[in-house]
Image (cartoon, rainbow, N blue to C red):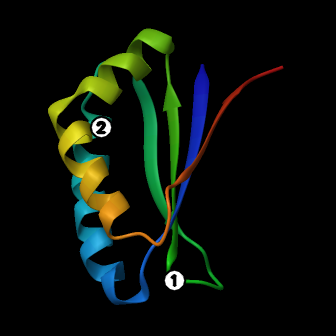
Amino acid sequence: MIRIIATFTVRPDAVEEFTAKARELVAASRAEAGNVSYELLRAREDAATLTFLEAWADDAAIEAHNASPHFTTLIPQLIALSTSDPVIVQYEQV
C-alpha cells in the first residue's frame, strides 16, 4: 500500500471555496478502483492549511487517479486557490 500526504496552504479568502472543491475530489477519489482511503483534514491551529491523506493499493491506482477527469479538473483549481504549490510526499510501509 502507498500513502500520500498532500498539504495545501490556502488563501484565507478562499478556504470555503477550496473546501467545497476538495470535498468533490474526496468523493470522486473514494469511488476509484485501488483507493483504500481518501480524507481531507484541516490543521487545528491554521484553518488555511488543508491536507489530503490518501492510501492506494499500488502505483497503477495512483497513475489512474492522477489521470482521472476529477483530478485533472479539480487539482488546478485547488492550486489556484492556494498561496503556493502543494507539498506532496508518498510513503510506503517499512
The residue depicted at 31 percent of the width and 70 percent of the height is: 18
Instruction: Indicate which disc residue 47 carries.
Output: 1
Left or right? Give the position of 8 relative to 67: right
Instruction: Looking at this view, name the residue that lies furthest to the right.
Output: 94
Q: What x and y, as percent, mark residue 31? A: 24, 32
Residue 34 at least partly seen: no
How far apart are the two marked residues, 1 and 2, measured between alpha carbons?
23 Å
Q: Residues within 10 Å of mark 1 (few under 14, many from 20)?
A: some
Q: Dot 2 surroundings within 10 Å: few (below 14), some, or many (20 or more)?
A: many
Q: Position of residue 51 (x, y in %)?
A: 53, 59
Task: Tell me the quarter of the image containing the N terminus.
Answer: top right
Q: Residue at x 42, y 22 (%)?
A: 62
**Quarter of the rendering containing residue 38:** top left
Q: Secondary structure at mark 1?
A: loop
Question: Mark number for residue 65?
Answer: none
Q: Is residue 40 left or right of residue 6?
A: left
| Residue at position x 49%, y 56% in the image | 85
Give the residue number, with chain letter if any, for mark 2.
29
Residue 59 image offset from top left, x and y in percent: 49, 13
Quadrant in which residue 64 is drawn: top left
